Amino acid sequence: MIQSSAIKDRLIQLLIKEIRNERDGELIEKSQIRSSIQMLIEVCKNSRKLYEQEFEKHLLQETYEYYKLESQQLIIDSSCASYLSKANQRLVEEYERISSYLDGSTETKLINTFLN
C-alpha cells in the first residue's frame, strides 16, 4: 500500500497538516497520527528510511518554517517577556508531541530545529 508514491505522499502531507493544525490550536486524533507514524517506521522492517527521509525530513522543514514565521510576528507584536513565555510554551508543546505520537529518534532533531 505505502509503496505507491501517490499514497505515500498523500499520507505524509496529511500527517504534516495535522501537526500544523495542532500547532494552530486545533484538536487532532493523536492515536491515529501515532498509528500512521508507526506504520511508516514498520513498513521497512530493517530500515527507518521511509520515516526519516520522507516524513521526518518534511516535518523538520515545516517546523522550521512555522516557528520562523511565528517568531517574526511575535518580535513585532510582543514584549520580550511575552516572547520568552510563548517560546517556552511552544517548547513544552513540542516535547508533548514527541511523547504523544512522534518517534523518539526525532526528539533531538525536532528540538534543535525549534531552537534555531
Image (cartoon, grey):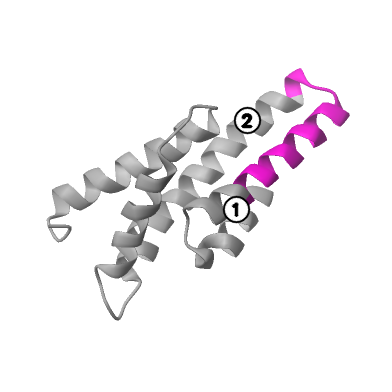
Question: Would residue 109 be found to the left or right of residue 115 on screen?
Answer: left
Quarter location, residue 98: bottom right
Residues packed near mark 1 inside 10 Å, few (<14), some (14 to 19) or many (20 plus): some
Amino acid, disc 1: Thr
Residue located at (39% from left, 42% from top) = 16
Observer able to see residue 56: yes
Q: Residue at x 40, y 47 (%)?
A: 31
Residue 13 x %, y %:
31, 42
Give the main secondary structure of the magenta stretch: helix
Q: Nearer the viewer, residue 102 or 81?
A: 102
Disc 1 is placed on an element classified as: helix
Tag of residue 70: 2
Q: Residues within 10 Å of mark 2 (few under 14, many from 20)?
A: few
Is 84 covered by the magenta stretch? yes
Q: Name the residue under label 1.
A: 113
Secondary element at tag 2: helix
Magenta segment = 76-95
